[in-house]
Amino acid sequence: MHRSIPARTDPSSTKPNRTNPIRTNPTGTSPAQTRPAPRRQHLPPSQHRQPLPRPRRPRDPPPAAASQTTPPTPNSGASGCPPMMKAVAFNSGMNPGMFDTIGAAADWLTFSPSIPGGPASPHATRGFVPMMAFASDVSAAISIMNSGHEPDWMLTFNEPDYSYMGYTPTMTGAQAAAAIAPLIAAAKGKKTKFVAPVTADPFSKFHDEFYAACNCRGFFSAYNIHQYNPSSAAVIQTLKNYRAKWGDKPLWLTEVAPGGSGCSTSWQQAGQFMRDIYGFAKGSGFVERVFWNTGNQIDGGDQNVCNSYLLDKGGRPSPLLDVYRAVDCS
């Protein structure tokens, strides 16, 4: 079933949630940013290690031969970008070969702690960043830490302040602090660095409560933010505002797209938005990595990423892929 999802906004306008369709953020510290809810693979708590099924699509088609040209090696055509800045977020229906097809990304994520193909897979060491999205992923994250194949980085809780279509659990800052405590203990002496939890509303009270309860702000090596808005200027201003509040660590932008325009954004506009964001990131001095969302086209009337995918459902290049490959962060 395909349907349009109502727009979600943060933090200066309004945002629906499960119990109250419209909620006003009192801070008003950031320009309006439109972002409907479902833009990524979120998993029901009972199935958090499996992709969320898409209605009427029990099985995704295998990717076609992606291109008539040889994909570039990571970051080729983008020599002006810092080595790890260009990254991509994949959603339900992806396979690791899509990362190879895109060719110009250094890092990738799939909203899962599980490494595609297992920890010995070649893709495990080719930029894959595991994510401990929910409290129920903590044990899996610890197992990965103790597997002998420790990742360089791991992302922690994904939007605990928002429930995706009622499927994903929410947590308060205090609950998240209790949930992450076993991971903090297990990580002592390990090489893995951790990225702080990311909220749907960048200026919610979650982080203040979380850090007060866990006393673990120093455990994290980077902060994390999500942004959807057809205006690159609005996104850039929000990043600056976030930096003003949380300024002691680098910032990862792990979801970004010109979303919320009702799918009216053209490929040309999406390409310019992309160039603007990567150009700002390089010059900012604080944005360390930018994960473009999405690497693969997804179903569901998702207004966040309907005109920002790099590969279509068959694994074929969209008009945006060549733009992504050519982005040089200038």
Image: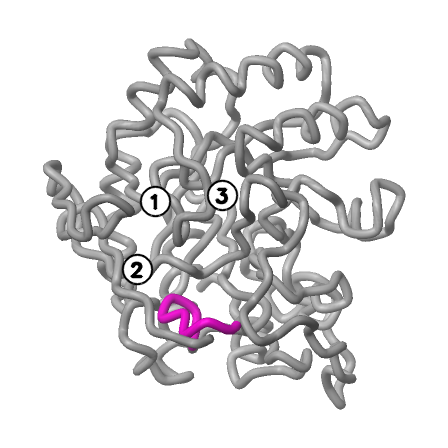
The residues tagged by marks 1 and 2 sit, at their Cα atoms, a distance apart of 9 Å
Q: How is the image coloured?
A: one colour
Tell me what residue is drawn at x 43 percent, y 44 percent.
287
Q: Secondary structure at mark 3?
A: strand
The kind of residue on which mark 3 rests is Glu
Against 244, residue 116 (above or below) is below
Is residue 238 shown left or right of residue 179? left
Q: Amino acid at mark 1?
A: Ala
The residue at which mark 2 appears reads as 35
The residue that appears at 41% across and 74% down in the rendered structure is 301
Secondary structure of residue under mark 1 = loop
Mark 1 near mark 3, Cβ–Cβ under 8 Å?
Answer: no
User: Residue 94 got which mark?
Assistant: none
- The magenta region covers 299-306
- Residue of label 1: 200
Q: Label 1 vs label 3: CA separation?
A: 20 Å
Q: Nearer the viewer, mark 1 or mark 3?
A: 1
- Eyeballing the image, is 224 above or below 81? above
Identify the residue under disc 3. 288
User: Considering depth in this image, is 221 or 84 the residue closer to the camera?
Assistant: 221
Give the alpha-carbon distance from disc 2 to disc 3, as whole Å: 23 Å
